[in-house]
Image (cartoon, rainbow, N blue to C red):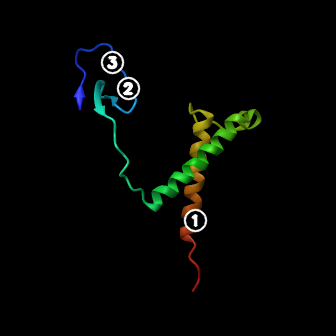
Amino acid sequence: MARNKENYIIEGTSGRIGQLCVMKIINGKTFVTKYPDRSKVVYSKEQLGLRDVFAQAAKFASEIVNDPVKKRNYPRQGRKSIYHCALSDYLAEQKRNKSENLSVQPEK
């Protein structure tokens, strides 16, 4: 990982340049790293399931934000945006439902 010391053009810049390199800010210092190769990563069934849940949460939050009536009536949590409030509410509900399903054991 290369650290930027005297180049004021990229100082404080973050993001990627194509698939060539990635610039990161760590503790206020700019670093340039190679683009990560995630082609050999194998995700578990649980990770793929959580990915689907998050996609549903994002869709739910987008629907709230795009509907003016729902957006106006949706409860805010401090300074969070409506999108992030809806996202966290959906994920919390999914977590609650999962824990309830685990606690209910079928009788033998």
Give the number of the mark in front: 1 or 3: 3
Disc 1 residue type?
Answer: Glu
Q: Earlier in the sequence, mark 1 or mark 2?
A: 2
Q: Residue at x 75, y 32 (%)?
A: 68
Q: Which residue is mark 3?
A: 10
- Total label count? 3
Q: Is residue 29 left or right of residue 87?
A: left
Q: What is the x, y in percent for residue 40?
A: 35, 52
Q: Quadrant of residue 106?
A: bottom right
Q: Is residue 17 left or right of residue 77?
A: left
Q: Earlier in the sequence, mark 1 or mark 3?
A: 3
Disc 3 residue type?
Answer: Ile
Q: Is residue 100 above or below residue 8?
A: below
Q: Quadrant of the C terminus?
A: bottom right
Give the number of the mark in front: 1 or 2: 2
Q: Residue at x 58, y 65 (%)?
A: 100
Structural crowding at the residue carrying mark 1, measured as other residues with C-alpha within 10 Å and reported as few (<14), some (14–19) or many (≥20): few
Mark 2–mark 3 Cα distance, whole angstroms, equals 8 Å
